[in-house]
Image (cartoon, rainbow, N blue to C red):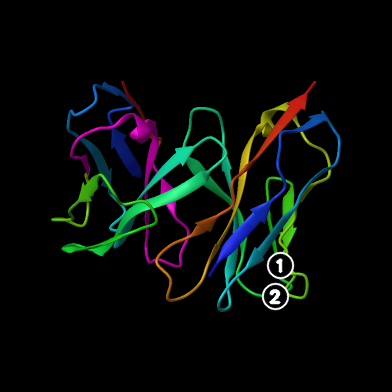
Amino acid sequence: GNSVTQMEGPVTLSEEAFLTINCTYTATGYPSLFWYVQYPGEGLQLLLKATKADDKGSNKGFEATYRKETTSFHLEKGSVQVSDSAVYFCALSVIGYSTLTFGKGTMLLVSP
Amino acid sequence: NAGVTQTPKFQVLKTGQSMTLQCAQDMNHEYMSWYRQDPGMGLRLIHYSVGAGITDQGEVPNGYNVSRSTTEDFPLRLLSAAPSQTSVYFCASSYSRDNEQFFGPGTRLTVL
C-alpha cells in the first residue's frame, strides 16, 4: 500500500534558524508528492508539490526535492519566521487510488 | 470564489444524537472528500465522491453516511453520535483525485 512517514514533532526553532522536516514514502506506483500547511484554527492549504523525480517544489521560501532513489521529499527553509509556526503535512497521491495519503503531521514552533 | 465552505464551525452533541455536517464548493470540482483529524493520527479519509451520484468509503467510514446529489454539495451525516466521533472534520475538493485538494476551514465536533 501507500504510506507516508514524517518526523515527529514538535520542532522548536528560533527565528532565522534553518528548518528541515523529513518525509519518506512508500508507494505502489509513481506518486506525486505534496506538502500541506495548517495554521492554527484553519484548514490545510497546499504549500508546494512535485510530480516527478528530481523536481523541486518551492513556495514562500520553502523547498522540497522529489528524491526517487531515497523515496524522500524533505521540506527545507533557510530562515524561518514566527509566522511559519504551523503543522506541516507530507502527502502523496498515486493515479488509480482514491485520494491523498497523509503523514501524521509535524508541528513547527518558531520563537522570536 | 468562496472555495470550500463548511458549517457549522463548532458543534456539541449528546451520545445518540444525529446531525449533518454541511460542505459546499463553488469551483465545479468533481472530486470531494471528508476527513477527520485526531491528535497524533493525521488525517483519515471517511468517504469520498468522484462526481454527483457516486460515493465510496474511505479508511474510517463506520458511523457516517454521505450522498452527492449535486456537484456543489457533499454533506456528511452522523447517524447516532458516539464519543469516539469527537474530532475535527475537514471537507476537501479537487478537480480530480490526483490534483491539489482544497480544504474547508473544518468543523470541530464534540460528542458527550
Q: Residue at horizontal 65%, vertical 64%? A: A25
Q: Is residue B87 magenta-colored? A: yes
Q: Quadrant of the C terminus of chain A?
A: top right
Left/right placement of residue A73 relative to residue B75 reads right
* Chain ID of residue with mark 1: A
Q: Residue at x 39, y 66 (%)?
A: A98
Residue designated by label 1: A66
The spot of residue B64 in percent (x, y) is 25, 46
Q: Residue furthest right?
A: A17
Range of magenta residues: B77-104
Which mark identifies residue B5?
none
Q: Is residue B73 visible?
A: no
Q: Secondary structure at mark 2?
A: loop
Q: Residue at x 56, y 76 (%)?
A: A28
Left or right: A23 as drawn, with respect to B27: right
The type of residue carrying mark 1 is: Tyr
User: Does residue B92 appear to the left or right of A27 in the view shown?
Assistant: left
Q: Tell me the element at label 1.
A: loop
- Residue at 78% x, 36% y: name it: A80
Label 1 crowding class (10 Å Cα cut-off): few <14, some 14-19, many 20+?
A: many
Depicted B26 relative to depicted A10: above or below: below
Q: CA distance from mark 1 to mark 2?
A: 5 Å
The x and y percentages for residue B13 are 25, 23
Count of numbered badges drawn on the protein:
2
Do we see residue B27 in this rendering?
yes
Horizontal and vertical percent for residue A19?
80, 43
Residue type, mark 2 in image: Ala
The image position of residue B69, as x and y in percent, is 13, 56
Observer-nearest of B37 and B100: B37
Q: What number is the disc on residue A53?
A: 2
